[in-house]
Every structure is written in C-alpha cells, then in structure tokens.
Amino acid sequence: MPVPEVADSFTGSVNRVTLGATKDSGGTRTSTVTVGGARNVVYGGSIEDASEKPVIAMDVLDAKPQDWPDTLAEPYKDVLDSPGDWAKKCVAEFGAEVICLKFDGIHPDKADLDAAHAVKVTEEVLKAVGVPLVLWGCGNDEKDNQVMPKVSQIAKGQNCLIGTVKEDNYKALTAIALADGHNLITQAPLDINIAKQVNILASDMGFPLERIVTFQATGALGYGIEYAYSIQERQRLAALGGDKMMAMPAICDVGYESWRVKEAKLADAPGWGDVKNRGPMWEATTAICLLQAGVDIIRMRHPRAVAIVRNFINQIWQ
Amino acid sequence: MILIAERINGMFKDVKQAIAEKDKQVIQELAKKQTEAGAAYLDVNVGTAAADQEGTMQWLVETIQETCSTPLCLDSQKPDVIAAGLKVVNAQNGLILNSAPLNKKADEEILDKYVEMAAQAGPKASIIALTMDKNGVPQDIDTRVAIAAEIVSKATEIGFDARRLFIDPIILPVRVPNAQVQPGNILAAIDQIGYLADPAPHITIGLSNLSQGATERSLINRIFLAMAVSRGLDSAIVDVLDEKLINIVATAEMLMNKQIYSDSFLKVYTAGK
C-alpha cells in the first residue's frame, strides 16, 4: 500500500539562532552552533524544510552536586568539584557541542555561593572549552538578579545563551544580556499564553526576537511529558503559522527532569531492571520524545543518554 | 487575517484630488499610515474620474513604491488597467489582482485573463475572484458556492494553486431594499467555500460596502467582520486605520484560536505581522 502524501506547507518559520562567537566576531569560542530554522513540523514537508540539527547542551554544575544518584555521578566522579575539568571532559570525551553551565551552587537553599564564585567558574569554563555556553541561573529570582548580570558581563562578547527571564522577573537580565551581546532564554511554566507574553515583554525592552530561545519548562517521561510535548508542538505550529512572537527555537531541560524521577534513580527495585541502564534510558527516551515535538536545544546529563540521542539526531537529520 | 487596506482609491475625495493634481505626498502618506496600521496589502484603485486609467494606475503604483515595499493589490475590473500596473509593480513580496468574476457576457474568458496575468507576475501573485457570473451577482447561498466551486476547479485545472485564490462572495449594502437577508447568506457561503479545496482558498470581502448608505457604518462593519471571522473569513478589504476594527479582528481571531492569547494580544496583533 502506498504511503499517502500528507505533508502540509506553512508560510512561517522558526528563527535561526547562533550561539558562540569566535575570534573573528570578538569572542574566544573555537566553534559556534546554529539552531532553529524549521519551516515545517518534525518529519513534515521536504528535507529543505527541516530545522538545523538539534543540539545537545551537556550540563556542568558550578558546585559539586549533592543529590546526584550514583549512576549519574559515576562518569564524572573525578571532575564533579572542578567545573572547568568537567566541561573539558564533556567536550573531549563525550563530544559536547554546547556546555550548559548551571549555577545550582548559588541558590540560597543550596550552597548559597556568591557572585564572585559564579564569575570565577564562568571564567574557568570559558577558558577550559571552546564550545558555546549556556549560562543558566539557579531559579531564585533575587539571587539570580544579583549574580547573573555579573556572569553576563564576564562572558561579554561570547554570544552565550543566558537565562532565564520570567513574566514577573525579566528586566535586569534582559537589559544586561542585551548590553553584553548574549542570546536570552524566556521561561514560562508550561503555559503557552505566558510564554508569548514574556517574549513580548523582552521585545518591548528592545531585545531582538531573533535572539530569544524559549523554555516552556519540561516534564520527564511519566511526569508530565505530555504537557511539555503539546506546548512545544503548539509553539512550533504558531511559528509556522506566522506568529512572530512565538517563532523562537526552544530549549528543554531533560537532564534535570529525568534524573529526579524515582524510576530513573531507585536502585532497590528489582522488577524495574538494572538501575545502571534505567536512568540513561529514561533520559534518552524523554529527549527523543521532545525532539519529535520540535525542540532545538536539549540539556542532558548522562553520557550514555547523550550518545543515544546524538545517534538518533544524526540518523534523522541527515 | 490578511488585511487589504482600502484607502488608496479614486472614489475617495482626497485621493481623487491627489490623482488630478499629481500630488504624491497624499498617496505616500496613506501608504505609510496604512502599512503601519497592519496592512498586508495596499489596494490601489484609480476610481472613475481619471481619463487615463492605465497611466494613473502606473503613477499610483510608482508613487507608492517610492515610499514603501508593502505588497499591492491592483484593483480594477479592466484587464488593461491591471496589465498597465503589472508593468511597473514589484511583485517580489506579494501581489493581488483584484478582481474578476467567473465570466461575463462581454468577456467569457475574463477569469482566465486574470489568472494568466497573476501566473506571469510571479509565484507570490494571487487573484481575487468574485462569486458572480454573466447572470450577475447571485442572491442565494447555493449559487454563490457553485460559482466559487467553478472558480476553484477552473484555477486548479490550469495549475493555479488554490492558495493563490481569494474568493470574494460579494457583500451588498444592507440598507438596500430586500437585501437584509444577504449578510446571513454571505456567512453561510463562507462556511462552505472553505471546504472547496484542501488546502482551502482564501476568502475575502470588501467590508465597507456592507454599510454603504447606512447609519452607524463603523458599528455595522465591525460586528459583521467579527461574525465572518468566526465562520472562516481570513482576509478582508477594510479601513485599516479604524483601530477599533483591527482590535476586533485581533480579538475574534484570538477567540477562534487562530492567535495564541497573551496579555498583550491587542498590541502585538499588527506588530507581529
């Protein structure tokens, strides 16, 4: 039986965003990455309509994580307290094209480290690797407003992706990201209406829509992934329909969300299979599912999961 | 909603005078203002006063293109006037030829001519086709839809994509005696025209005609537009300078889930285009 032709065509497209600045553009990155550009849904339309290859951003934490399960900590055990070496390992051994430096350690409920620490770590990672960086705050508005502008400044000219800004806390970071020439992550709590509004608010401050990446919040497999999926899909369809306020590439946080669910980390569960496989598979499955909804950058953690997902991407985006 | 701005039309006094005096500024101001207000296309109609309609069409097109690159909608029932405009128009960003009926007594091939001209003008050129034929404007729903179906099949037969067609079901002034049934008929016709092809042709109306000669013109136009959006209208020739009208389009489209709601949905409706 012939496969029916169901391809739809659209008038709009997803913006292209380039991360990283090499020497020629005033930075010190040795490579750049461009994402976005889709003119159809994933698998839809012709090959020319497909997006740039989605990219995996491997997480590096600014301070040694206290709550990582053994399976996840094991591959990084010699570098967990040295973000520079950690980033180097991700690039050299696991092929990371982007590093996401996540400032968990500055959170008041965690190590409550200060801006000087964050600046030092940023410098260290910038020096250690040549790939583009994502700089991601701790999620506490007050602390992020204190620390992230300083992080932004020290990475000025590197064309990083920095975030996140939210509907009720966007001004400080938007202004500094604009001044320092970074790209910006706008965040919404699985709410498409707020997602659009944050983009409008950032745009009202003069931030170019073409340099925004959206973060809709992520749910892991079994823990709300269907909400994340349908929002990502809706965002993509709005972009393709010509909605300029929704035409941004999307980032999702698969690593953190996958590794906090019990199915990924509970060792004492014989019926669920070997925990060493379960965790990476949970992360890989979550990532591949969201790729099909149309996300462009995926934050990930376990090297095995990264390898599986990269293999999938390379097969699909040939 | 694909908004086609109606003001550059020789039927309006200021435009008529500008044409007579070759006053570019009036035309260029209107072009700019309508573009800023969110027009996707600027309608260009020489009206009836100018003796040299073809020359006037060219002068208007050139005058507008000196000041903005908004796509134009060349508006004339005479193929020669359209052809004159086509010689100078820039169709790179889009173009509409407005408009041809299915056929007319004096010219059985009128629709073919417009389709042919659009096909030659480039891949982004569309036409507006009226649901009327040599018997005139139909009064009922079924004949309107039947003519629309003939238009769609005729266009697709010669390889003209239905997405480059704007079907205009022809709205008549509501205050004309015995015409009050017509707005309801138009809505029912819009419902059905959307199913004539997949992907569907666009559907457009010359909105202001509805309220010709009536009181409360703006109110009539605005309410009908909202009603028509709910039935699938995706384009209209309107006064884009009527801010309330544009807000109503934005709201109606949001309510029909064609635009994602945000707290600033009104503000970004035209900015996002």
Image (cartoon, grey):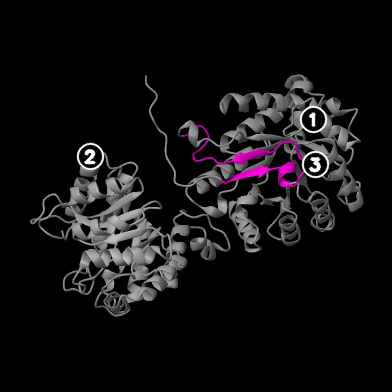
Residue A25 in magenta? yes
Q: Residue A123 vs residue A23: left or right?
A: right
Q: Quadrant of residue A129?
A: top right
Quarter of the picture containing the N terminus of chain A is: top left
Q: Kindly check if marks 2 and 3 are in contact, taking CB atoms under 8 A apart as contact.
A: no
Q: Quadrant of residue B3?
A: bottom left
Residue B158, disc: 2
Q: Amino acid at mark 2?
A: Ile
Quarter of the picture containing the C terminus of chain A is: top right
- Residue A314 screen position, x and y as percent: 61, 25
Q: Determine the secondary structure under disc 1.
A: helix
Q: CA distance from mark 2 to mark 3?
A: 58 Å
- Residue A52 screen position, x and y as percent: 58, 36
Residue A90, disc: 1
Q: Amino acid at mark 3?
A: Leu
Q: CA distance from mark 1 to mark 3?
A: 12 Å
- Residue A195 screen position, x and y as percent: 62, 53
Q: Residue at x 36, y 48 (%)?
A: B124
- Residue B81 screen position, x and y as percent: 22, 61
Report the span colored magenta. Answer: A15-44
Q: Residue at x 89, y 31 (%)?
A: A79
